[in-house]
Image (tube, rainbow, N blue to C red):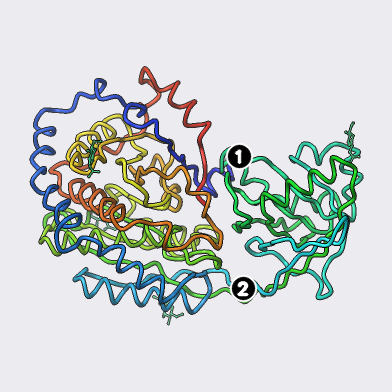
Amino acid sequence: MEKALVLFFGLLVFTSCDTINNDVVQEDECDLPSELIQEIASYQPTVNRIIDSVTKGKHRGQPYKLLEDFIDKFGARQAGTKNLEDSIDYVFDLMRKYNLENVHGENVTVPHWIRGHESAEMLQPRKAKIAVLGLGGTISTPPEGIEAEVLVVRSFDELNQPNVSAAAKGKIIVFNNDYITYGKSVVYRSQGAVKASQHGAVAALVRSVTPFSMYTPHTGHQSYRDDVKKIPVASITVEDAKMLQRYQDKGIKAVIKLHLQSEHYPDATSRNAVGEIVGSQKPEKVVIVSGHIDSWDVGVGAMDDGGGAFISWYSLALLKSLSLQAKRTLRVVLWTAEEPGFKGVHQYEKDHKNELDNFTFVMESDEGVFTPLGIEYTAGVRGGCVLKQIVKLLEPINATSTKYYDSVGSDIAIWARKIPTASLYNTNENYFWWHHSDADRLEVLDPDNLDKATAVWAAVSFIIADLKDEFPREFNDISTLSNSKIIETLNTLKQKPTR
Ligand SMILES: *[C@@H]1O[C@H](CO)[C@@H](O)[C@H](O)[C@H]1NC(C)=O
Ligand SMILES: *[C@@H]1O[C@H](CO)[C@@H](O)[C@H](O)[C@H]1NC(C)=O
Ligand SMILES: *[C@@H]1O[C@H](CO)[C@@H](O)[C@H](O)[C@H]1NC(C)=O
Ligand SMILES: *[C@@H]1O[C@H](CO)[C@@H](O)[C@H](O)[C@H]1NC(C)=O
């Protein structure tokens, strides 16, 4: 992917079951001082308390229970809506009830685009309803809709061929790109409207970016360009994209009538939601745990990113309830407006630019909260080695793996290789089945997994905030490691952004 896109989407890798030994940093290449290894090992009783209280004790099931109440009350929480702001106020009340300190919001200007009526009907070769979901920020069709013949392409390269380009004029372009990885496939969603318009198309329909479908369209962010005529753009299901391809391959003409209505309102004010446990000795040094509070308007945003947001603030609630105060400050930040383009984190970076050097470690869970396996991270070799020692303490919940990537998280990817960052390493290989669709519901998540993930999040953030020395702030030595080439290739193949 091109650089701008990498920065914009934040590269992130989704992991499969090849766990355990596929970290770039191997333990036999670590040479941490034995005092540090002993210092980390001394946290085992603390980690056991954390684990026991949230997997067996009084906190068991609480992250899920509180998320359930939240999701059932608010449902989807789209940027720009009053519902999102009400849900943020509700989380402030929760944070205060669980004794977090300095609970407050920090203003962010966010876009406000609201989906209206949407429908599509195939008129030829037979009449049939086509499921559609407008992509974020799409313009509307004229009220009477757009009726046009369909031209299916599998790739931008195919569209660029002179005879295909010539045929595109006046058509509805259907992008039937196979799912390879999210990162490779999502460009058809983010750039499909612009590319189709450049070839004279009247609308674009993009095959949903997912490896699995039960006839569900998936929405997501897309970008127009100021110098290219805007055309309406929506996602369709994998099944319909393949059907339209079959018609075309057999020389059968397909005609679709598309209706998309939506409103672009003036920008609105939202808030990043913040709470803390102020550090006892170095309060100016901060370890951030985070997720994003907003969601798309379809489904209820339980997986993306209700789970990540709730394990994050609840980790601090749990530590507080166990009277665990670290030397450094622990800060939860629930980013707003991640979905329409990382608006919350970008504002936060501006507002806190003098504090960035004091951010010891930044964590974000936005890749699902399935069975936790450990920690994914962006740091140098010494940082990787420290994390390996820390996750050993998570043996009681089998979350002892680490995995290096060039960038982790979604919002926090803007700090990759500037600040050590981490994400929850979990069995999220099916994440994109539900992502940005009506199927992102509470039932995707599991209470026991949320408990374990909360334990990982609380234990790792607490130890890093409490260690005598700063977490190593170095990034430059990963490529010298013996197995880094193999792993890096593996990672490149799997690279995916989250949005
Ligand atoms: C945040 O936004 C609200 C509502 O728009 C406004 O009343 C308040 O003054 C803003 N706060 C800051 C610190 O700018
Ligand atoms: C473009 O040309 C290729 C062969 O050169 C052909 O297979 C394809 O069907 C043509 N596509 C269109 C839309 O004319
Ligand atoms: C960052 O930390 C240093 C000392 O560790 C402190 O002097 C400075 O005020 C802190 N900066 C901010 C913005 O908190
Ligand atoms: C950890 O893994 C072991 C061996 O696979 C299994 O017996 C145990 O139940 C697991 N523990 C948890 C908490 O998942």
Queried on whether the Cβ of the residue with tag 1 lies below 8 angstroms from ligand 2, the answer reads no
Left or right: 124 in relation to 137: right
| Residue drawn at 30 percent across, 29 percent down | 381
Placement of 296 over or under 253, stated as above or below: below
Placement of 63 over or under 49, stated as above or below: below
Farthest residue, direction top: 482
Instruction: Name the element at disc 2.
Output: strand
The residue that disc 1 covers is 184
| Residue drawn at 80 percent across, 46 percent down | 152
Numbered label tally: 2
Percent from the top left, x then y, of residue 270?
46, 72
Displayed quadrant of residue 396 = top left
Counting residues from the start of the chain, the first of labels 1 and 2 encountered is 2
Mark 2 packing: few (<14 Cα in 10 Å), some, or many (20+)? some
Question: Looking at the image, in which quadrant does ligand 2 appear?
Answer: top right
Mark 1 packing: few (<14 Cα in 10 Å), some, or many (20+)? some
Left or right: 361 in relation to 283: right
Displayed quadrant of residue 112 = bottom right
The residue that disc 2 covers is 114
| Residue drawn at 74 percent across, 47 percent down | 175
Displayed quadrant of residue 421 = top left
Instruction: Name the element at disc 1.
Output: helix
Left or right: 262 in relation to 352: right
Percent from the top left, x then y, of residue 321?
14, 64
Percent from the top left, x then y, of residue 379?
34, 37
Residue type beneath disc 1: Lys
Left or right: 363 in relation to 260: left
437 or 475: which is nearer to us?
A: 437
- Can see residue 221? no
Placement of 126 over or under 118, stated as above or below: above
- Can see residue 431? yes
